[in-house]
Each structure stands twice: as C-alpha cells, then as structure tokens.
Amino acid sequence: MSRKGSISIKKILAVIAAVAVVFTGGFMVYLSGLGAPDPGNTDEVTVEIPTGSGASSIVDILDSKGLIKNRTFAKINARIGGYSTLQANTYVFTPSMTLPSIMHAINTGDFNYVAKQTFVLKDGATIPQAAEALSKVISVSKKDILKVWEDKDFLQEMISNYWFLSDRILEDDIMYPLEGYLFPDTYFLTSDEPSVEEVTMMMLDSMDNALTERRALIEQSGFTVHEFLSLASVVTSEGGTMISEAPKIAGVFINRLENNTPLQSDVTVNYALQQKRVDVSIEDTKTDSGYNTYKNTGLPVGPICAVPADDMDAVLNYEKTDYLFFYACPDGTVLYAKTSEEHQKNINENPWSEEDLAR
C-alpha cells in the first residue's frame, strides 16, 4: 500500500472516530436532558392527564409542574419514545424522577403513581374543620388527628423542617399550633392508608411553595410570616366569597393597624369562642382572649383559618384608601366608611333581618 493511501485511510478512520465521539457525546447530553430535574427532591407533585392527551401535550403538562429537566429533549423523547398507550388519570410524581420513568408510568397507568384518594382542605377552614374533613378520608378519628397536630415532638420536627414555622406556634396563647399554616387545596393521596403526618407534610409543602413565592414581598411588608398569616386569615374569614373585595378589606385593616385602632373584627371573636355566627353580641366582644380584636389592639395572636393564595396577595397588594370601616350587607354588598358615624349610618340603613341571620 502506498504511503498516500495509508494517510487517506487514517483520515477516514479519524473522521469516523470524531463522528462517533460527537454522536456519543450528543447522545449522553440527550440522556442527561431526560434526567431528574431535581434529584433528591421527593416532594409530591400532582399531575392530571386529561383524556386524549398525546405525548407532546403531556410533556407540556409535566413542564408546567417543574418535572422536566430539558424541554427540547423531552419533546424529542415524546416523538420517538413509542408511548402508544398513554392513560388519562391523576398521578403523583416527584422532581427526583426521570422523564422516561414518568412517561412509562403514564403509558402503563402504573397504579403505584395513581392518586387513590382525594382530600380537600377548603379556603377558610379552621383546624377542627380540617381534622373533621381528613377523618373522612383516612382511618383516623378527628380527635386523634388533633392529637397529632398538637404533639410537641411532631411540631418541633416540623419547625426544624419548614422555614416559615417558628416556636411562636407552641406558645400557650395559641389555640391550635398549625392554624393558618395548612394550605387550602385539593390533595391527591397515593397511599391507601396515609398517615396524619404524611398528609400534614403535603399541606405544609404546599404552604412552603405559596410563601416562598411571596417571601420577598412578605419581608418588605414589615410583617413576620406569623403576623402576615394572622392578618390574611382575618381577611379570608371576613371576606368569605367576596374575593373582589379582599384587597380593599385588607386595606381597611392595615389602616386601623397603622392608626393603632382595634381591628374590631367579629370573626376573631367567633374564633375565640369557637363558633360561627353573624350576630356577635356586646358581651361576646368582651371575651378574654388574645384572638379578640375588640378587646385587644393589633393583630390576633395567631391565624384563625386556612388562607388561600388570593387572600395572601390581597394583603400584599392591598387597596389604599382612607376607609376605617366596612360593613357587609345582607345582599352581599360591602359598604365602606371613613368615620364611625358613616359606618353606623350604613348599618342602620341596611339591617340584617332574623331570616338573614338564620341563613
């Protein structure tokens, strides 16, 4: 063989080797892109796959849930992965799972990842109400659920695990330590018999997400997290279904705080008495409790209910006005006033009947 021919063969082999290296390297990058977006993160993420969803649209859903490491490579995998039996359902995955493992679970309808039970914590629910609702989903009584939520060892563990919990929740003036810290949402449970502790951590994880997203604004507000949730819970309980009024209601309470005027919120009296009614009496407002904002100036000693994200935002982005009073009419209208005289006029002109109070 001539020297020239030998050189040509070496060049060809070199090119082949280079192509192989590029291909192998590219393939490794591709495989890496299909890896877990957050290895070691075992937080459960609920994913609902609608009927008729294709592999590409499922990638979009997973990406919106933070379960995709590289969207481009995930889309390629959706095209060439051979996912032909994708099954609609509600699944529970974690960021520590790879894309192929998630897609395999959806393609086979893997029962290990399918939500078996649903637990709903409603906006504005109190701890006793939450315990009652949870007792209907898991095989634990309301009484025993409340025991877990009051267990000092469990609470200390939660305080060490979640940045927004502090020893403040353990103080004697707090009625229920986790009040206001369990995020209201729909929770899909993958275990047939989940423990109270497991479900509690799911709710605290959701609260962690909600508060972390707003952490900078909370710090700018000047409130501690405990104070922030206390105020937001009052807005939630006062506002009820009047979501559009929440920013203005929050503004009224903030005005009163800045003026060192008692909040005089009926819902805080109701919480102190562990009741719920519209016709709070003069005697009720004299109740000796740190939650009673008629008797005490400032915020209640702690949150009084589960706070949804909308009401957190209402406090952080409250509507600035000169109002110091608001009054909810029987028809759902909310009237605002700058003075006690204007407020009393609103009350007199829009009285609640016995029938209204009984609803």
Image (cartoon, rainbow, N blue to C red):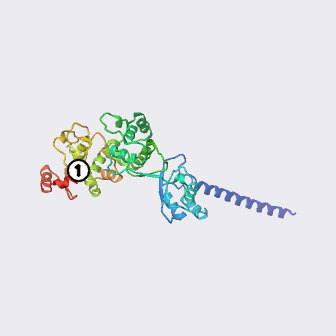
Secondary structure state at the residue bearing disc 1: helix
Q: Is residue 232 above or below residue 146?
A: below
Residue furthest right in the image: 1
* Residue 21 as seen in the image, left or right of residue 88: right
Q: Which of 348 and 71 is in front in this view?
A: 348
Residue at x 19% of width, y 46% of height: 280
Q: Can residue 30 be seen in this view?
A: yes
- The answer to which quarter of the image holds residue 2 is bottom right
Residue at (36%, 41%) from the top-left corner?
178
Q: Where is residue 143 in the image (x, y as percent from the top left)?
A: 37, 40
Query: In the figure, 53 relative to 162: above or below?
Result: below
Going by the numbered disc 1, the residue's amino acid type is: Val
Q: Is the residue marked by circle 1 packed among few (<14), some (14-19), or many (20+) residues within 10 Å?
A: many
Position of 23 compared to 166: left or right?
right
Q: Is residue 323 visible?
A: no
Q: From the viewer's perspective, is residue 259 above or below residue 334?
A: above
Q: Mark 1 points at which residue?
A: 252
Residue 355 image offset from top left, x and y in percent? 18, 55
Q: Does residue 95 sit above or below 19 in this rendering?
A: above
Q: Quadrant of the N terminus?
A: bottom right
Tell which of 129 and 216 is nearer to you: 129
In-front residue for pair 337/308: 308
